[in-house]
Amino acid sequence: MTVHFPPKLYNHLLLLLVYSLLTYCSCKVASSEVNNNHVQCVESERDALLHFKQGIRVDHCGYLDSWGQSQECCQWRGIRCNNHSGHVVSLRLRGSSSGGVPCLEGTLDVSLLNLKHLKYLDLSSNNFGGQLPKFIGSLATLEHLNLSHAGFSGVFPQEIGNLSSLTSLDIKNFNGRIESLRWLSHLRLIREVDLSYIDLRTTTSTWLSIVNNLPFLRELRLDGCGLSLTSPFSLSYINASTTLGVLSLSYNNFNDTSIFEWLLNLSGLETSLTYLDLTFNLKLFRNDLQLSESSMKVLDNLCSLQTLGLASTGLNYKFSNILQSFSTCPQKALLYLQLTGNQVWGSIPDNIGAFSSLRKLNVAQNQLNGTITQSLGKLTMLESLDLSSNSLNGTLTTTHLSNLSKLRYLFFESNTEIVVNISADWIPPFQLDMLILRSCKIGSYFPRWITTQKHLSMLDISNASISDTIPISFWNSSLWSGITHLDMSRNMINGTIPDVSFVFDNLPQIDLSYNFLEGTIPSFLRNNVSTLHLNNNKFSKGLFSFLCPHKQTRLSDLDLSSNLFSEKLPDCWSYFDRLYNLHLEKNSLWGSLPTSMGALNKLGILHLSNNNLSGTLPVSLVNCKSLVMLDLANNSLSGHIHPDFGHSFGNLVILSLRSNRFVGVLPSSFCDLSYLQILDVSNNYISGIIPECLYKLVSMANTEDEFDPLLADYLGEIYYDSARVMWKRNEQTFGGGSSFTSFGGRNSLTLLKGIDISSNKLEGHIPEGISSLVGLKFLNLSRNNLTGIIVSSIGQLASLESLDLSHNHLSGEIPPSLTQISSLSILDISDNNLTGKIPIGTQLQGFDASSYMGNPGLCGAPLPKCIGDEASAIIPNGDSKQDKKGDLIVGLYISVVLGFITGFWAVCGTLVLKTSWRHAYFRFYENTRDKIYITWVVKISRAWRRS
């Protein structure tokens, strides 16, 4: 019996059969590329892989150990083959992505060209170095190429544009340069592109037009490329992608909002774009309210957006209006909102609770104000909440937090008006990884609810007005298992710390400074801790047991300063071989410096000032060659300063031996301290002369705070460290958050440069080379026995603010160049043998007379006038009267001449111009002449007759 199918049904069955066959073939091919159990390796490709292995010098991860152990290369690590043909289709040797040592180091061999069926090549996070080979562009079958973080440099090969089948390209952190992106336009099938952290500034005029003509582009990452943006209005959008889902352009130089105009013209973006990151384009909105408002309207149609990053873009907009931009979206898809470091203002609106999918909300470092809305408690999916460094107020209660069961990161620091009012017995529904409430008002009682947190890695409740004791439950809680950072400093916490049997796992940093803790330092705070700050407390016991553990410690930063210890300084420092920062100043420690301190060969900063230490400097101290700061001031140390001092401590930046009992001479090796910025050996018994070679102190001859890169590890600490320095006649603390205003807001300890060798027994003259140290802020050579003159070129010290040469035996005149130091605010050259007139200049005449007293031969303002000044004062007055008389005579002559000229031309000019007047005048003149003649003749005749 013959079965007849209707034509329509027949067609459907035929299509179904074809579809089934295609599906079967696809599955077979897919499985063949995964299952290598029975694949036979192609010999030429095996040889190519072995040649590749020969180019690898180092294999830290053992990736290539299996290569060559068998003939079946498809079984080697990192290799995938086509199960049907046996051809290698995938080579994946991705190195370490955690920033550790790269797995592979070497070069790429051209033998890779024999892998003619290679589709997937991943050599990322290794270190191949050198030029990226051009032959990569000949791997015609490649679909996925990942060479990110691979150490390549040089000029990027344009031949990569020949990979017409490429759909995914990742070369971020390429160390060379890309001169043009035209090759990218040839990759017509490309879907994913990551060129992040490559300098693309030369492509600024073309990059957007090239990207805009990649029709299948789904993911574009160009972070940190130095890009700017030309106007996108002239672009053609015919071939533009309609499926762009990820756009990451952070850390570039966009200085206007044209990027939003481009986004508006991309069709399909409202349903495809899920990720938009423009963070750290500092001038994107230029802090302009109108730009912010118009650009935020772009968000109205981006209803699929899940991640929005606009941190540090100059955004100046009301926070409630930013959230309102998403109001047209029926369902709020937003998961991550990053707005840190802008000028976002206003309160947190109640409608924030509508964003029920939100997982991360970061609006730190803005200008938010008002109270904390309870609607935050509706964000039940929230994992991270960062509202730090704003001006929020009100009370944070359990109502805000009780429903946030997924919360892991909570940051409210530096909102000084926020009051944290949470019951001590409250049990949170979440387990936090980080809790930062610094400078909030937690209140008098210790927040015991914190002890319920078992996974904390960072806890900061510093400066939070806590005046309670720390409960035993806190020290016994399991939160310590993962802690890396604990800061409870700057409170009023009192009582003692119990010595519990606990060993940290993660080398935490612990700061309990500036409290009222007392008693003995518990030993558990020393075990597996990297940083321990207990300074400015009332600890008084147990220093010896703490510093003599009889086993190696892992402490690198220890600060026990400003406590009440009055013990002998222990001699157990060989157990602290990792220490680079040691503060023991401002206690009552006694005894000599221990010999074992020479074991601290990594020590960079040593503070032992303001104690009762005595004895000489141990010879073993010269082993501490890494010292950058050495402060032994205000003790009773004695003996000579070792002649090789400068050679042993070649990295010293700050040296203070002030107020001790050192004797002998200043070693000439001091001149080799080329990084030295502060030299203070004042108030000792140093004799001899000032070394002539001071001009070699290179750092003091520099007006900038530039250091050798080798010192970077320690200089980072100096930026947060502090030191006591005699500055403008007062002992002041520089650095560590104080005295910043004197030097432009930066840590003044790194900018302060000066020499203080006052109150010693130095003789001889002031070296001429001292005037080359143009970076000096202060120079104090007072209270010595110096002779000779003040160097004539001292005016070159243009940065000088304080100069004290008083109480010496200096002679001669004050150099006129001293008037050139316009920054000078403290000057004292009193009690010397200086003579002559004080040079005239606003600077020197502005100081009090006490700055010059005790120099009998010195005169001139502000001291009494010099001899001869009175006579010269009279002469100028006489000259003044003579000048006034002369001025009168000159004025008389000028008046007569002007009168004559005016009268002459008033009469004669008229007679010249008018004929009738001229004739009348001469007739009058002749008649008058005749009358006078006749009159005189008659008078003479009468006189003759009488005689």
Image (spheres, helix red, strand yellow):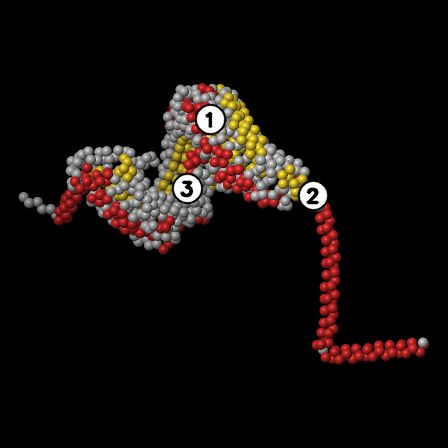
- When the figure is inspected, residue 23 is found, relative to residue 205, above or below; the finding is above
Which residue position holds label 1?
619
Q: In this view, does 920 lie to the left or right of 354?
A: right
Type of amino acid at the residue the image marks with label 2: Lys
Residue 865 numbered mark, or none: 2
Earlier sequence position, callout 2 versus callout 1: 1
Disc 2 versus disc 1: nearer the observer:
1
Identity of the residue drawn at 49% across and 34% down:
669
Disc 1 versus disc 3: nearer the observer:
1
Identity of the residue drawn at 66% across and 42% down:
836
Residue 360 numbered mark, or none: none
> How many angstroms separate mark 2 from mark 1 (CA)?
57 Å
Asked whether the beta carbons under mark 3 and mark 2 sit within 8 Å of each other, the answer is no
Asked whether the beta carbons under mark 1 and mark 3 sit within 8 Å of each other, the answer is no
> How many angstroms separate mark 1 from mark 3 (CA)?
54 Å
Most foreground residue, 318 or 471: 471
Most foreground residue, 34 or 272: 34
- When the figure is inspected, residue 206 is found, relative to residue 612, above or below; the finding is below
Most foreground residue, 415 or 167: 167
